[in-house]
């Protein structure tokens, strides 16, 4: 049976997610701001949950209809056979997102959809599911636009960036799916050199190591679809048992940070992400200031997510403008032949680093608007020399 699914993702990564889902063999049908639609059987949703590194969730579309009032939403939800998908013993959460909706209150819309689901169960069986906003068994999502309401059952459960490997000891870790999306945009693929000189908890390097070793993004966690009544255990077991390509190049991965705790956290996260201790030792992880890192190959990708804001600051320089100038100088001096990418919410980075970006991609880290700067380092680059480096973008 053909179903429609929607995979939300961090804003700015929609095209990357489209490509990723196509590479997984999924039939992508549309791309919207904030996500990608695809169609297929339930097993295709299982596959996306297990393998996608960029999606935030996979939602299964169960209804779409025009509405004008909250009462229309109630009637739409009341008419659905919820008991075919889950039971009154399950706990429930409803989330509503609205864009240009004529309704005054999203909270009231949420309440009416929740009421309708509970009333549908009560009419059928005499009892109703209870609400759990923290760890529900089942999540229902509604998207309201100016005229239509689309209802989805979530197949993921916890958001997909929660891979299950993280031991958080460092501040401001990057979400795993944002890190994976940045790797995708950077053009990094297994077998290419990769350096993260401000590794924090090691998110970029852990994602890259899993990709190199063919470890599925969701291989260590459970999913919402396992709790739905139409769960197909044999399909799921088959997907989990599938062989994945394993690449060479673990020793081309290198993580460093000025903080020794971050280096330890990166090592611990690598091991809890399924990389054996022996394999993890092939990945360089050292304590060094980013202004002094050296390349580990003639060409490759450097990705950095520097600290920003009052809560965490760069260490080792009197202020971050000095730090970024010196960091930029190090890239110019040592990294000719490399693509260097910096994710930051500091809109003044370009002025501080004194490099002209080849590309500047808007991305959202949760609600925080960021820029992913890509600097293409060429031999002989000098500070702000046009021609020696790429032209300055407007
Ligand atoms: C925003 S966090 C990086 C988070 C990381 N991407 C993750 O996913 O966990 C910034 C990191 O930069 C490190 N840092 C600060 N000053 C540095 C310096 N001078 N050289 C290298 N790393 C530095 C901090 O210790 C921190 O771990």
Image (cartoon, grey):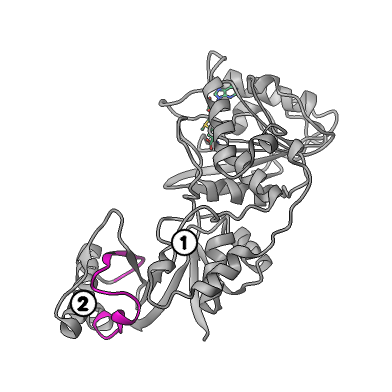
State the quadrant of the C terminus: top right
Q: Label 1: which residue? A: 57
Q: Quadrant of residue 116?
A: bottom left
Q: Is residue 173 visible?
A: yes
Badge 2: residue crowd in 10 Å (few <14, some 14–19, many ≥20): many
Q: Position of residue 200 (x, y in %)?
A: 54, 31
Dividing the image into four equal quarters, which quarter contains ligand 1? top right
Residue 253 forms part of the magenta stretch? no
In the image: residue 81, left or right of residue 365: left
In the image: residue 21, left or right of residue 35: right
Task: Identify the secondary structure beneath mark 1.
Answer: loop
Label 1 beta carbon within 8 A of ligand 1: no
Badge 1: residue crowd in 10 Å (few <14, some 14–19, many ≥20): many
Q: Residue at x 72, y 33 (%)?
A: 282
- Looking at the image, residue 196 lies above or below residue 242: above
Q: Residue at x 24, y 59 (%)?
A: 132
Q: Quadrant of residue 358?
A: top right
Of pointers 2 and 1, the one earlier in the residue sequence: 1
- The residue positioned farthest toward the left in the image shown: 126
Q: Observer-nearest residue: 157 or 257?
A: 157
In the image: residue 108, left or right of residue 357: left
Q: Position of residue 323 (x, y in %)?
A: 60, 20
Residue 80 forms part of the magenta stretch? yes
Label 2 to label 1: alpha-carbon separation? 24 Å
Q: Position of residue 109 (x, y in %)?
A: 23, 69
The region drawn magenta spans 77-101
Q: What count of labels does the image hold?
A: 2
Q: Position of residue 304 (x, y in %)?
A: 62, 34
**Label ID, residue 116:** 2
Q: Quadrant of residue 207?
A: top right
**Mark 2 vs 1: CB contact within 8 A:** no
């Amino acid at each position: 049976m053909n179903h429609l699914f929607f995979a939300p993702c961090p804003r700015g990564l929609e095209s990357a997610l489209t490509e990723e889902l196509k590479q997984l063999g999924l039939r992508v049908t549309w791309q919207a701001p904030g996500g990608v639609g695809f169609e297929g059987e339930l097993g295709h949703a299982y596959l996306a949950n297990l393998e996608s590194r960029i999606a935030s969730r996979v939602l299964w579309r169960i209804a779409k209809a025009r509405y004008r009032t909250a009462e229309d939403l109630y009637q739409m939800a009341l008419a659905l056979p919820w008991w075919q998908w889950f039971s009154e013993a399950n706990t429930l959460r409803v989330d509503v997102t609205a864009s240009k909706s004529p309704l005054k209150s999203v909270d009231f819309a949420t309440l009416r959809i929740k009421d309708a689901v509970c009333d549908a169960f009560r009419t059928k069986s005499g009892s109703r599911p209870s609400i759990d906003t923290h760890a529900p068994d089942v999540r229902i999502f509604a998207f309201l636009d100016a005229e239509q309401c689309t209802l989805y059952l979530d197949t993921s459960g916890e958001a997909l960036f929660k891979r299950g490997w993280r031991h958080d000891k460092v501040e401001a870790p990057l979400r795993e799916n944002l890190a994976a999306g940045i790797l995708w945009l950077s053009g990094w693929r297994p077998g290419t050199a990769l350096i993260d000189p401000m590794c924090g908890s090691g998110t970029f390097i852990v994602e890259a190591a899993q990709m190199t070793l063919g470890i599925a993004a969701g291989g260590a966690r459970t999913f919402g679809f396992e709790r739905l009544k139409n769960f197909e255990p044999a399909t799921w077991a088959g997907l989990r048992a599938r062989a994945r390509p394993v690449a060479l190049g673990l020793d081309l991965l290198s993580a460093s940070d000025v903080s020794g705790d971050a280096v330890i956290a990166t090592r611990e996260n690598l091991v809890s992400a399924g990389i054996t201790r022996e394999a993890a030792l092939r990945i360089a992880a050292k304590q060094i200031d980013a202004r002094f890192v050296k390349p580990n190959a003639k060409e490759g990708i450097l990705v950095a997510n520097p600290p920003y804001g009052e809560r965490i600051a760069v260490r080792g320089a009197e202020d971050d403008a000095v730090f970024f100038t010196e960091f930029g100088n190090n890239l110019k001096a040592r990294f000719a032949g490399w693509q260097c990418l910096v994710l930051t919410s500091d809109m003044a980075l370009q002025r501080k680093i004194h490099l002209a970006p080849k590309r500047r991609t808007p991305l959202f880290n949760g609600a925080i608007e960021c820029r992913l700067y890509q600097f293409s380092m060429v031999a002989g680059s000098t500070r702000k020399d046009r021609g020696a480096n790429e032209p300055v973008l407007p």
